[in-house]
Image (tube, helix red, strand yellow):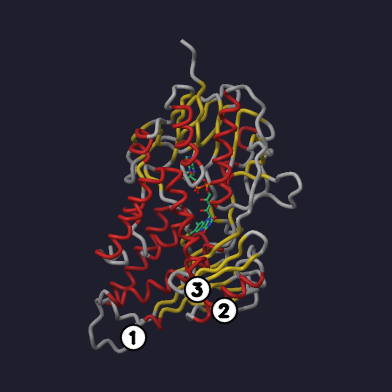
Amino acid sequence: MKKLHRIAIVGGGAGGLALATALGHRLGRKGLARITLVDAGLTHIWKPLLHEVAAGTINSFEDELNYFAHSAKNHFEFQLGRLDGIDRENKTLHLAPLTSENGEMIADARSVAYDTLVLAIGSTSNDFGTQGARDNCIFLDSRPQADRFHKKFLDMYLQAHALPEDAPVRPELNIAIVGAGATGVELAAELHHASHEFVQYGLDEIDPHHVNITLIEAAPRILPVLPEAASLAAHAQLEKIGIHVLTGQLVTNITPDGLHTKDGLFVPASLKVWSAGIKAPDFLKDIAGLETNRINQIVVTPTLQTTRDDNIFAFGDCASCQLPGMERPLPPRAQTAHQQAKYLVKAMVARLEKRPLPAFEYRDYGSLISLSSANTVGSLTGNINIQGRIARLMYLSLYRMHQVSLHGFFKTFVLWCKDMLSKTSGPTLKLH
Ligand SMILES: Cc1cc2nc3c(=O)[nH]c(=O)nc-3n(C[C@H](O)[C@H](O)[C@H](O)COP(=O)(O)OP(=O)(O)OC[C@H]3O[C@@H](n4cnc5c(N)ncnc54)[C@H](O)[C@@H]3O)c2cc1C
């Protein structure tokens, strides 16, 4: 019997899960290849939703997808495990021992054999070694971290609710967010929105005007990847809703009480979030002799193959891909991962048929930033600035497009209807 070509995809995020699903249908269903997806978690949630998970404005339990259930329906296999090494000579990847939340052993270290390996393990926040950042800030790299933030945020309201009615001082809440890229800006706006929502549910001891949100950015302006006009519009909108924006301030030290900047400012904060910069996970640095850059991303060619091994591909946030004629590598964004996943489906089919791989072509559709209920701003291809309802609709359609790549149009429509129904029947804020 002919041995099936084994394609192992590590990382079931914005890019990896879409790729595994499409390859399952294209190759797995017809018995043309064996597709295995490996992820460190049991469930997937689209990473650009994490700031909403943190604020509680979406319920992460409703929006998550179980890998085992999804793989069974979509003709690929799922392995729960955390990649910790690659043996290129024997074409195997190593998975770390699997332990439960309580630290009990579930499975020993294992290996998975591959003919083609695709790495899509995303990125983590880069604290640039800032003193106190690891110990005192929450990062928004994963669902458990976003849940942890939400729990702390909610606890502050529960604490205030438990105060005696005649308490002498009205409580206030100081939140500081380091980094005014898309994550920081969207989180600030979402927390502002959530602070007003709490009042609807009787948790009104913390007046929304006493929720002080400070966004701190080292660059001269917020959202440096957007054209200046869009960035200024977002800045003005944030200040209008009462968010304190500090630009040109480099955070140098973070303590349990707040943040110190290079210019000598101190920003008091009980809740602190680090969202400045990204890097690929540290264990990727020079992994198996592959070429990596200074932020641990694996360097790939325009066919998304690693520079030192044609059998290994990498894409999404964990890869550095500079296409001919471009001044810098592609941005670490969901739209990059999405376009690369689509390209890799064609590339994998070509590889199996022993045809030359087409080159990946990237199209920048622009960037949209959600300022929660206040507005959506951004720029489209050709530096066209956009805001308001149309921008909001386009922003929301990004998640729906991801759902279409996983479930097809019909189920995405059903999910959209379900979301609309639960918004009208249930609380608009997660209160547990
Ligand atoms: C709060 C927030 C808001 C954002 N908003 C936007 C936006 O509006 N627009 C936009 O374009 N981008 C946005 N982004 C960026 C976007 O989320 C990422 O660019 C995108 O998710 C990258 O996709 P990926 O497939 O490379 O990685 P991810 O989606 O991060 O997926 C990585 C997967 O790999 C798994 N994994 C990690 N390590 C291992 C390991 N060792 N072994 C096995 N599995 C592993 C993880 O569990 C995860 O499932 C946002 C990011 C954040 C955090």
Secondary structure, mark 1, is loop
Local SS, label 3: strand
Please identify the quarter of the rendering in which residue 105 is found.
Answer: top left
Q: Which residue is identified by label 3? A: 258
- Viewer-nearest of labels 3 and 1? 1
Q: Would residue 186 be found to the left or right of residue 156 on screen? A: right
Residue 241, how many percent across, how many down?
47, 80
The residue beneath circle 1 is: 170
**As shown in the figure, which amino acid type bears the numbered disc 3?**
Gly
Q: Is residue 58 left or right of residue 286?
A: left
Query: Dot 1, how many residues are within 10 Å of its Cα: few (below 14), some (14-19), or many (20+)?
Result: few
Residue at 50% across / 66% down in the picture?
390
Q: Report how far apart the C-alphas of labels 2 and 3 lie in the structure.
A: 25 Å
The image position of residue 129, as x and y in percent, is 60, 58
Q: Which residue is mark 2?
A: 236
Cβ atoms at labels 2 and 3 below 8 Å apart? no
Identified by mark 2, the residue type is Ala
Q: Position of residue 152 (x, y in %)?
A: 36, 65
Image depth: mark 2 or mark 3 in front: 2
Which of pointers 2 and 1 lies earlier in the amino acid sequence? 1
Label 2: which secondary element? helix
Q: The C terminus is located in which quarter?
A: bottom left
Of the numbered discs 3 and 1, the one sitting upstream in the chain is 1
Q: Is residue 263 left or right of residue 99?
A: right
**Toward the viewer: 63 or 11?**
63
